[in-house]
Image: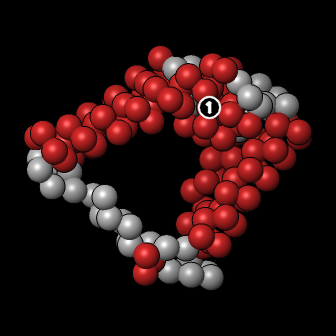
Amino acid sequence: MFVDWNHFTPLASLAGGIAIGLAAALYVLGVGRIAGIAGIVGTALQSLRTRPANALLPWLFIAGLALAPWCWRLVAPLPLIRVDVGAAGLIVAGLLVGFGVRLGNGCTSGHGVCGLSRLSLRSLVNVAAFMGAGALTVFVLRHLIGGT
């Protein structure tokens, strides 16, 4: 494993963690729901069918997620993104993540940020499962199949 100490940014990481924690806390205190992205997207998509009175909030949350990089660009350059896999790999990965979200009844933000902070045992099991699956996937792809 290689740590790029020249680009290590503990203060920016701390600020980002505080912002995510604050947003999750405000969402649960203000709305009474967990700020899990999969659940919010699911609620937004469901609102297209059912048209509830509070349908605007999940769409505003999603818009905030989409606009955040554009706001960040006002103060600093965006980090470089490098994807070393083709379109087929991205599609398979997306489908596997979607399956895992349904299987685990939540996503990394719901379980990892909100669930662990509430000391949820179910979230702890889910986080251990998806972190373990991610580590195993990297090991297999880099050391057994790809070698990079």
Quadrant assignment, res 33: top right
Mark 1 residue element:
helix
Quick check: 55 left or right of 92?
Answer: right
Quick check: 90 left or right of 24?
Answer: left
Q: Pointer 1: residues within 10 angstroms few (<14), some, or many (20+)?
A: many
The image position of residue 143, as x and y in percent, is 16, 45
Q: Is residue 121 above or below residue 63?
A: above
Choose between 73 and 81: the one closer to the eye: 81
Q: What colouring does the structure picture have?
A: secondary structure
* Residue picked out by circle 1: 111
Q: Is residue 88 above or below residue 7?
A: above
Q: Is residue 105 above or below residue 96?
A: above
Picture residue at 56% right of the left edge, 81% below the top: 76
The image position of residue 59, as x and y in percent, is 67, 43
Figure quadrant of the N terminus: bottom left
Tag 1: residue type? Answer: His
Q: Residue furthest right?
A: 30
Figure quadrant of the C terminus: bottom left
From where the camera sits, is residue 146 visible?
Answer: yes
Choose between 142 and 84: the one closer to the eye: 142
